[in-house]
Image: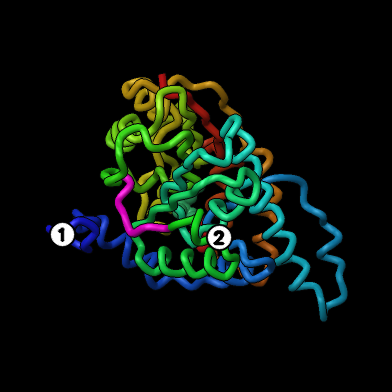
Amino acid sequence: MTPGSTADVLRTPYQRSVAEYWNVEKDPVNLRLGAVDGLYHHHYGIGEVDWSVLETPLDRRDERIIAELHRLESAQAEFLLDHLGPIAPQDRLLDSGCGRGGSSIMANARFGCHLDGISISQQQVDFANQQARLRDVQDKVRYHFRNMLDTGFDAASFQGIWNNESTMYVDLFALFSEYARIIKPGGRYVTITGASNDTFGLPSKSVCDINARYICDIHPRSEYFKALSANGFSPITVVDLTEATIPYWELRAKSSVATGVEDPFLTAYKEGSFQYLLIAADKI
Ligand code: GPP
Ligand code: MG
């Protein structure tokens, strides 16, 4: 197999089906929000909602709701970046499961450092590279068609690695084994993720509905700590963001870009079967 060829990157029928999903995805909930300021996200939002947007006169109401949802998604990305620790301009960061690339652009703007983003969707990689060119940061922010379980990067390449809502597509032990290879000793790993709550029992109907919607496999919270520890990562911060994300979902449910997944998310969070977590860990 040629390195970087489709067969080399997409190794299983499951991975091919996930790539197909993201290659054709053009959902207004992502494209209209991204168009607000050119930062295209594939994650959800956190923080207090400005509910006055719902009272806006009809001619501007939709636009203001979209801008508010986008503000909350960017706040989520800033919160993730807050947990990477000190990053110098000469450092290199990996945005693993980068989607259309918004978080990497924000990290480069904040730290001035080198960013690599990876995705198994060629369409997302092409879109993200085009955004980097539009912002004239293509020398420092580069997106690649690669598999996060076998990235092809050199050992000890990265000061920091993050997954912003993309760990539910992979086995965590295999993932953190690859990260243990490519992160520098003392480097920081951060994820924001949705995890099933071990104390609820087995996955709830709502968690199963979310899995079916995105073709993913939401892991139990405990699995993150087992897999991190098994691969030499020591957790330093855990933040339960469940309460902080519920307002985003309540506003999204009332918006013109609701997709139907709002109800399973709100049910799962409110019944306690699912949690929105930030986990940061250092490589020993
Ligand atoms: C991507 O966000 C969402 C996921 C990759 C999977 C599920 C996440 C969990 C926390 C379980 P998106 O922005 O593409 O989704 P949407 O189109 O619904 O906004
Ligand atoms: Mg989205």
Comparing marks 1 and 2, which lies closer to the viewer?
2
Q: Is residue 265 above or below residue 194?
A: below
Of the numbered discs 1 and 2, the one sitting upstream in the chain is 1
Compared across the picture, whether 144 is left or right of 70 comes to: left
Look at the image and say whether residue 53 sits in the magenta stretch.
no
Of helix, strand and loop, which one carries label 1? loop
Front one among 204 and 259: 259
Quadrant, the N terminus:
bottom left
Q: Magenta segment range?
A: 143-148
Does the numbered disc 2 mark a residue whose Cβ is under 8 Å from ligand 1? no
Q: CA distance from mark 1 to mark 2?
A: 28 Å
Residue 249 lies, in percent from the top left, at 64, 53
On the image, numbered disc 1 is attached to which residue?
A: 2
Q: Inspect the image, locate mark 2, and give the three-letter code of the amino acid beneath it.
A: Val
Residue 214 lies, in percent from the top left, at 41, 57
Q: Is residue 5 above or below residue 94?
A: below
Compared across the picture, whether 110 is left or right of 204 comes to: right
Determine which of the numbered discs, if any, sits on residue 158 in the image: none
Q: Residue at x 42, y 65 (%)?
A: 124
Q: Inspect the image, locate mark 1, and give the three-letter code of the amino acid beneath it.
A: Thr
* 1 and 2 marks in contact (CB < 8 Å): no
On the image, numbered disc 2 is attached to which residue?
A: 137
Q: Residue at x 65, y 61 (%)?
A: 253
Of helix, strand and loop, which one carries label 2? loop
Q: Residue at x 30, y 34 (%)?
A: 155
